[in-house]
Image (cartoon, grey):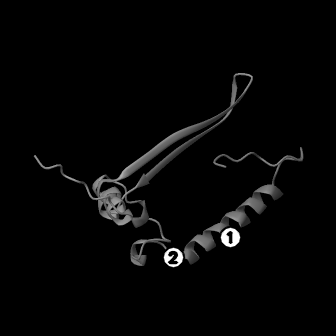
Amino acid sequence: MPIEQRQPQGLVDILDKILDKGLVVAGDIKVSLANVELLTIQLRLVICSIDKAEAIGINWWRADRFYSSDARALPPAEEYDSLKARIAELEMKLNEHAPASGKAPERKGR
């Protein structure tokens, strides 16, 4: 009975398998002091091909205006800039009409 020898896999073969099947790396980093948790960082990394990512439902780059080549489906950058300017103008007007207590009204969403 002959013994079958396996050929060592090269980096290209390993990378091809990872991109084809996908690889998920997950981990948590917790910083505690005297049994009091101060900070938790959750890390999630998915490495796969674009075809595999779309097959599992990951396609965030299609809606991101910096990565999408379909500019017609996304608002132009000038529109974002004009909205930012309008928000700044409204904030200034709001601060002008703030109560006399010297505190600006609190805003939600920041």
Q: Contact (CB < 8 A) between labels 1 and 2?
A: no
Element carrying mark 1: helix
Name the kind of residue labelled 2 in the image.
Pro
Is residue 104 rendered to the left or right of residue 38?
Answer: right
Q: Is residue 36 above or below residue 4?
A: above
Mark 1 and mark 2 lie on one chain; the one further toward the N terminus is 2
* Among the 4 quarters of the image, the one containing residue 94: bottom right
To which residue does mark 1 refer? 85
Say the numbered circle drawn on residue 101.
none
Q: Establish if 8 lies above or below 67.
A: above
**What's under tag 1, amino acid-wise?**
Ala
How far, Cα to Cα, is label 1 from label 2? 15 Å
Q: Quadrant of residue 49?
A: bottom left
Residue 59 figure quarter: bottom left
Q: Position of residue 29 (x, y in %)?
A: 60, 38
Say which mark, if any, is on residue 76: 2
Can you tell which of label 1 and label 2 is closer to the viewer?
Answer: 2
Furthest-left residue in this view: 1
Image spot of residue 86 (x, y percent): 66, 68
Q: Viewed as shown, does residue 99 lie left or right of 7? A: right
Q: Position of residue 98 (x, y in %)?
A: 82, 51
Instruction: Please tell me which residue is depicted at 48% across the width and 72% down the height of the picture.
Output: 75
Instruction: Name the residue: 36% across, 61% down.
Output: 15
In this view, 77 is above or below 92: below
